[in-house]
Image: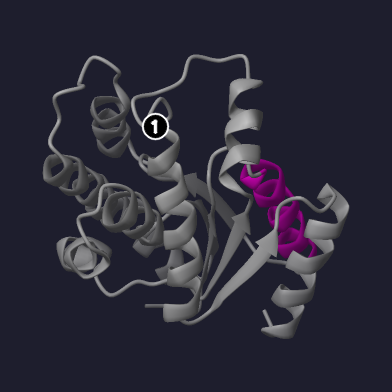
Amino acid sequence: MGKGLFITFEGLDGAGKSTQIQRAKEIFVQKGYDVVITREPGGTEISEKIRSIILDNNNDEMGFVTEALLYAASRAQHVFEKIKPALDDNKVVICDRYVHSSIAYQGYGRQLGAERVMEINKHAIDGIMPDLSFFILLPTEKALERLMKSQRELDRLEVEEVDFFKRIEEGYNEIADTYDNIVKIDASKSVDEISEQIKYWIDKKGF
């Protein structure tokens, strides 16, 4: 792998990841980096097709293991086709969600277990883990409140029960204490305060 940087953003929908991803891109562009922004599930044509299957509300009979495997399949193609080539080309890749999402959503939310989900994803990630991951964390109730105000149709996972999201929230906190290079950020702070924290950590890491 080249000298590229892999930065990921995690958190419940409604936490404000999208805004901070754009802010992070601006930080890296000002530092002279070539930046690629991508997302999971998705990021490539094949991965986006898998995403549509995962999130389709009509697929309500999908098994939890099937769901985890589909996420891993989407990720495998994403890493192969987009993430790894960009890193090899010395670019900064900023990804909205990565394997930590699967551990939180399927490992904790679906209660498949963190180790089991990581094992499923071992081949998908091809040894690539984030150089830095920002967990933009918001209490479940606040995240769901923001989600309901989003004025768009909710997908198959977003219509789950509150307890599902509470387990995910718990999962993100436990994951942050388990893996390296994770920064937890309070999503209730202002957009500018969060951006300042992100810039602080990017600078502190020497990127």
- Give the main secondary structure, helix, strand or loop, of the magenta stretch: helix
Q: Tell me which residue sits at (23%, 14%) in the image.
A: 58
Q: Tell me which residue sits at (40%, 52%) in the image.
A: 167
Most foreground residue, 125 or 108: 108
Q: Position of residue 31 (x, y in %)?
A: 76, 69
Quadrant containing the C terminus is bottom right
Residues in magenta?
16-30
Label 1: few (<14), some (14–19) or many (≥20) C-alpha neighbours in 10 Å: few
Q: Position of residue 202 (x, y in %)?
A: 70, 74
Q: Is residue 20 magenta?
A: yes
Q: Position of residue 24 (x, y in %)?
A: 70, 57
> Does the image show residue 14?
no
Most foreground residue, 14 or 47: 14
Is 118 drawn above or below residue 80 in the view shown?
below
Q: Which residue is mark 1?
A: 161
Q: Tell me which residue sits at (64%, 50%) in the image.
A: 138
Q: Quadrant of residue 193?
A: bottom right
> Does the image show residue 40?
yes
Q: Tell me which residue sits at (17%, 42%) in the image.
A: 64
Most foreground residue, 105 or 111: 111
Is 199 drawn above or below residue 13 in the view shown?
below
